[in-house]
Image (cartoon, rainbow, N blue to C red):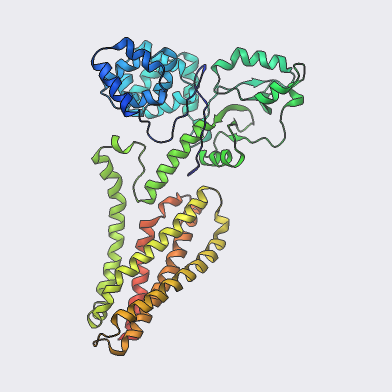
Amino acid sequence: MRGFLFSYSGKNLRGGEKHSVPPARKEIRMKTFETYEKMLDNKQYHALRGELIDENPADIAGLIENIPVDKAVLIFRMLPKDMEAEVFADLFPDVQKELIGKLSETEIQLIMEELFLDDAVDFIEEMPATVAKKILANAKPETREEINRLLKYPEDSAGSIMTVEYVDLKSEMTVREAFERIRKTGTDKETIYTCYVTDSERKLKGIVSAKTLMLAERDEIIGEIMEEANLIIAETLEDREEIAHRFNKYDLLSIPVVDSEKRLVGIITVDDIADVIQEEATEDFQKMAAILPSDKPYLKTTPIILARNRIVWLLVLMIAAMITGSILDYYETAIAVVPLLVTFIPMLMDTGGNSGSQSATMVIRGMALAEITPRDFFKVVWKEMRTGFLVGCGLSAVNFIRVWFFYRNRVEFGGEILMISAVVSFTLLFTVMAANLIGGILPIIAKKCKIDPAVMAAPLITTIVDAGSLLVFFALSTALLM
């Protein structure tokens, strides 16, 4: 899922279409924001309500997120009941929590009745236990039962993001009967674009699209027009990233979810998968920068939490970098004999780190898109070795000429300048090849060990490559120049 992009307009609120919501933070237009805030301050509530009704719910959510909670409650209460839930679903969790604390039990119950179950589950998962209990206590018994069932699925599983609100048909129905069922139940369903055909035991037999139904004769039997071969399905305990890959590969708008007995228990729609893709991509970027993942937006995260998320890996990398210092200390004599060697250390370390980062980024991206699997280990090794050799040769040749040109007239080096150039250039070749190789294989090894490949990114690879390149550099210098 990581890195995919979708543009979709689906269902969010019972009986209404969901407006397209960009994956980034929602922001209302500045002119509108200032106008609405002024109208609120001037207590022009009736006029403000009329304006808000015509706004996109995502923009209203952006307005609510940028004003104090007391004013946010006023805005929220001005909205029509069928619009409240859609705006509420678009708010950040911490804003939702603040609103819940200000709303009455009746208002909470109305919101829970309007939200689709998957949105309600996402909301409850983000809330503290005390708030979650208050919300569930005000939900209808059948809604509470469904929410509790969905909450039992593992956090990153398909079951945790599915909804149980779908249109199910029977194979013996006619198209006319199918339309009657859709009209009767479709208002409360997540989507009616795809209907799912089940038997008496709720086992999935096939699917039929709204297009197929509309083009079919009214007396045709559903079992004769449904798709039943090569159905794309998900299982409740499958990782949600795998489901996202499936959406991307087959260009799906929704996918049925079955349990271990192949009974249909829910569906996952593309708007939920888009959220998953965004979350996983954000998590990967944070891990690749050696930051502990956080599900809160940057501006909503306190400096204490930011520091806590960053300091852990920085401590690990700082301690690991002490190895580099130990190597420099060990070869102090070589540095004293040929002080010029010190000037090449930053170049070698930076080049190695950059090369490893390039390689790791390509492999991690390939693994995220399912283009690379652990079975491709030796293919990656062979490709990165050749790539590293070609890049290393080019950089080494340029470096050899540079060192010789700038230092050839320095008397203290005499005839050693060619040897110094060769040592630096050979070390650079080794460094680039090693960095490419390490950057390519570490993410695959991590995946094989059930570790997120993004952890094996730039900072860790740079630390490993730095130590290796310094060892080779000083070993060659000691052998050839001393």
Q: Nearer the viewer, residue 56 or 437?
A: 56
Quadrant of residue 192 within the rendered picture: top right
Asked whether residue 229 appears in the rendered view, the answer is yes
User: How many marks can you see?
Assistant: 0
Taking the spot 35% from the left edge, 13% from the top edge, the residue there is 49
Q: Residue furthest left?
A: 336
Taking the spot 35% from the left edge, 28% from the top edge, the residue there is 29
Residue 157 vertical position relative to residue 333 in the rendered view, above or below = above
Residue 56: give x, y in percent of width and height.
42, 23
Q: Nearer the viewer, residue 22 or 341?
A: 22
Taking the spot 35% from the left edge, 27% from the top edge, the residue there is 62
Residue 150: give x, y in percent of width and height.
49, 27
Q: Is residue 426 left or right of residue 330?
A: right
Residue 43 vertical position relative to residue 297 in the rendered view, above or below = above
Residue 221: give x, y in percent of width and height.
76, 20
- The C terminus lies in which quarter of the figure? bottom left
Residue 300 vertical position relative to residue 333 in the rendered view, above or below = above
Residue 109 vertical position relative to residue 323 in the rendered view, above or below = above
Q: Is residue 61 left or right of residue 338?
A: right
Asked whether residue 479 appears in the rendered view, the answer is no
Residue 405: give x, y in percent of width and height.
33, 80
Taking the spot 40% from the left edge, 42% from the top edge, the residue there is 282
Quadrant of residue 415 within the rendered picture: bottom left
Q: Residue furthest front?
A: 31
